[in-house]
Amino acid sequence: MAPTIVVGGGIVGLAVARALQDLRPDQPVVVLEKETQVAAHQTGHNSGVIHSGLYYKPGSLKARLAVTGAEQMKQYCEANGITYDVPGKLVVASSDRELAQLDRLLGIGRENGVPVRMAEPGEIEEREPEIRVRAALVVDSTGRVNYRDVAASLARDVRNRGGEIRLGVAVSSVTTAGSGAVVHTSAGDVEAERVAVCGGLHADRIARASGIDPGVRILPFRGEYSELLPDRAWLVKGLVYPVPDPDLPFLGVHLTRGIDGVVHIGPNAVPALAREGYTWSAISPRDLWDSLTYRGSWRLARRYGRIGAQEMARSLAGRALVKAAQEMLPPLQVADVRKSMAGVRAQAVARDGSLVDDFMFKRSGPTLHVLNAPSPAATACLPIGAHIAQELYRS
Ligand SMILES: Cc1cc2nc3c(=O)[nH]c(=O)nc-3n(C[C@H](O)[C@H](O)[C@H](O)COP(=O)(O)OP(=O)(O)OC[C@H]3O[C@@H](n4cnc5c(N)ncnc54)[C@H](O)[C@@H]3O)c2cc1C
C-alpha cells in the first residue's frame, strides 16, 4: 500500500502526520525531512509562547485554530510530561494612540473567545514592578513551552504508531500519477497515496517545482533577539508585549521570560539574505535572486520601506532595540543585554506586495501544500494538523 507522505519535519508536518494516523489508523505515514533532525528551522528558533488568539481577525483560520490550539497544546503537554506553564501576559499601552488600540484589541480578543481584560489598578505594578506604562490588557491564557520538546514528542508519537520519519531526505517536487502521487527526493522517487507538503521556508518553491502556482512567494524575515544578562533578568517577571501596529503582521519589540527563565528582548524583523539565514553573513544567491526578482518584494518595499529601514538600523545598532524596549522598561540599559537567538520567519507575500495574514493551504489533486503557516502556527499545530488531514482526504 502506498503511504501518505508528509514533507517537512517541523511542528506542522509532525502534527499533520500524527493527525493522519488518528484519521486513518491503517494507512502508513512517512515524513521526509531534509535536515538530520526534526524542528531544525522555525520550530526550533522561536519565542516559545503558547499564544492565546488575541490578535487575529475574528473568523479567520488563525483566530479559530489559535484559540483551540492553545488549549490543545496545554493538554498535550500535560498528557506527555512536557514542561510548560501559563503565566498569562500583559499587552501594554504607553501613549494615547496605543490606549485606543488597546480598546480595539480588547474587542477583538473577546470576539475570539480569549479571556482578556483590562488590568486592575495596581495589577501592572504587582505583576511587573519595573514596567512603566499607561494601561495594560491582561491575557490569562498565554503560556510558555519549548516547541523543540513538543516536536520531539510528536515525532515519538508518529514512530510509536508505526509511522516512519526519514531524515536527510530533500524533496524537490511532487507529481500526480494516476490517483496517487510520486514524490521526487534526493534518495529517489517515492510513490504516495496522498502528500501533505509542510516545507516552511521552502513551501512556495516546492509548489512551483510541482507545477502549482502558489500565488505567493515566501520572503524570509529574520527575527533577532537580545537577552537580559542573568544578573539583570529580574527586571522582567513574565511576558510583556506592546500594542501591535494594526498594519503590520509582527508583534513589535516585546519582553519575554521563557520557560527556561531567559528573558528575550526583540525581535527586530529584517529581510534575511537566505531562507535559512540566521545571521547577516548567511547569504544565498539563489534565495536573494528569488526575492529580488519578485514583483511583490518591490511593492512590499514601497509600502513598508520606512519601517524596514528602521528595523535594519535596529539590527545593525543594538542600542536601538534597547531604546524601543525602554519605552516599557525605563531602567533597561545597553549594558544589561547581550545578543541572543535569531529565527527566520517564512512570510508569504502576494504579488501586490501584501503580506498574507491568515494560514494558507492549497490542494491540487492528491497533494496539499501549506503555503503560509506563520505565528501562531506552533501554538495551533494540533488543530492545523487535524484540519489538513481532513482536507487531504476530502474526496
Ligand atoms: C522568531 C520567531 C518567533 C516565533 N514565535 C512563535 C511563538 O512564540 N509561538 C508560536 O506559536 N509561533 C511562533 N513562531 C512561528 C512558528 O515557529 C512557526 O509558525 C512554526 O514553527 C511553523 O512550523 P512549520 O513546520 O510550518 O515550519 P518549520 O519549522 O520551518 O518546518 C519546515 C520543515 O520543512 C523542512 N523542509 C523544507 N524544505 C524541504 C524539502 N525540500 N524537503 C524536505 N524537507 C524540507 C525544513 O527543513 C523544516 O524542518 C515564531 C517564528 C519565528 C521565526
Image (cartoon, rainbow, N blue to C red):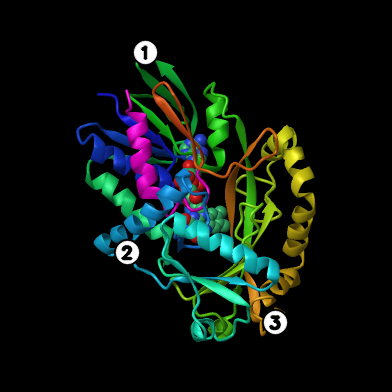
Between the residue at mark 3 and the residue at mark 2, the CA separation in whole angstroms equals 35 Å
Dot 1 amino acid type: Gly
Residue depicted at x 47% and y 63%: 49
Residue 394 covered by magenta stretch:
yes
Between the residue at mark 1 and the residue at mark 3, the CA separation in whole angstroms equals 63 Å
Residue 40: tell me if it is visible. no
N-term mark: 3 or 2? 2
Q: Nearer the viewer, residue 353 or 120?
A: 120
* Dot 1: element: loop
Dot 3 amino acid type: Gln
Look at the picture and state if 115 lies above or below 153. below
Residue depicted at x 75% and y 53%: 308
The residue wearing badge 3 is 333
Question: Could you say which disc has been placed on residue 178 in the image?
Answer: 1
Where is residue 298? Give x, y as percent.
77, 39
Q: Which residues are magenta?
A: 373-395
